[in-house]
Image (cartoon, helix red, strand yellow):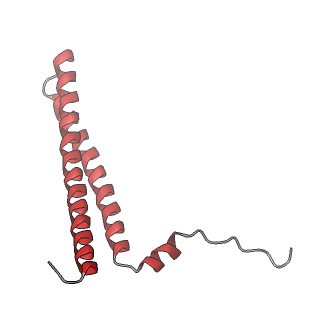
Amino acid sequence: MPADPDIARRKAAEEREEMRIGLRMMGLAWAMLSEVLAGTGVGWLVDHFWGTAPTGMTIGACIGIVVAMYSLIRGGLSMNAYLEGRGKPIEHRAKQSEPAAPERDPDG
């Protein structure tokens, strides 16, 4: 154990943050899988009740893949923005999040 408790706390906080990021990425993967399976399942149901096999399942799987890719890209961009913001000093992040004051017209 490090002699300085601040170093130990910082290291533990970094490990928790890395775990949080890993779990968020794992959540993206599970969401992608479930969206593809849901689209395939809906397509199978359409095929089952309307007797259109394998058209419904194929279309459902394609729609599921498109939705999954959209979600994955959105989640990845969100994660990228978060990770880029992590590298900035806290003061800089706070200044970015403050709304800009409206400018007044000097003429009236």
User: Could one spot residue 18 in this view of the protein?
Assistant: yes
Q: Position of residue 42 (x, y in %)?
A: 22, 28
Give the image quarter of residue 14.
Answer: bottom left
Residue 53 placed where, x, y %?
13, 24
| Residue at x-position 25% and y-position 39% | 63
Q: Residue at x 17, y 81 (%)?
A: 2
Which residue occupies the foreground of this view, 13 or 53? 13
Could you tell whether 82 is left or right of 107 in the image? left
Residue 59 visible here? no
* Residue furthest out toward the bottom: 3
Residue for point 59% across, 68% down = 99
Count of numbered circles in the view: 0
Q: Quadrant of residue 104?
A: bottom right
The residue that appears at 72% across and 74% down in the rendered structure is: 103
Residue 17 location (% of width, % of height)? 26, 66
Residue 82, position in %: x, y? 35, 67
- For the N terminus, the image quarter is bottom left
Q: Is residue 82 left or right of residue 3?
A: right
In the image, farthest residue toward the right: 108
Q: Nearer the viewer, residue 100 or 38?
A: 100
Q: Is residue 78 left or right of residue 17?
A: right
Q: Is residue 49 above or below residue 101?
A: above
Horizontal side, residue 21 vs residue 93: left or right: left
Instruction: Work out which quarter of the rendered image holds the C terminus and state it.
Output: bottom right
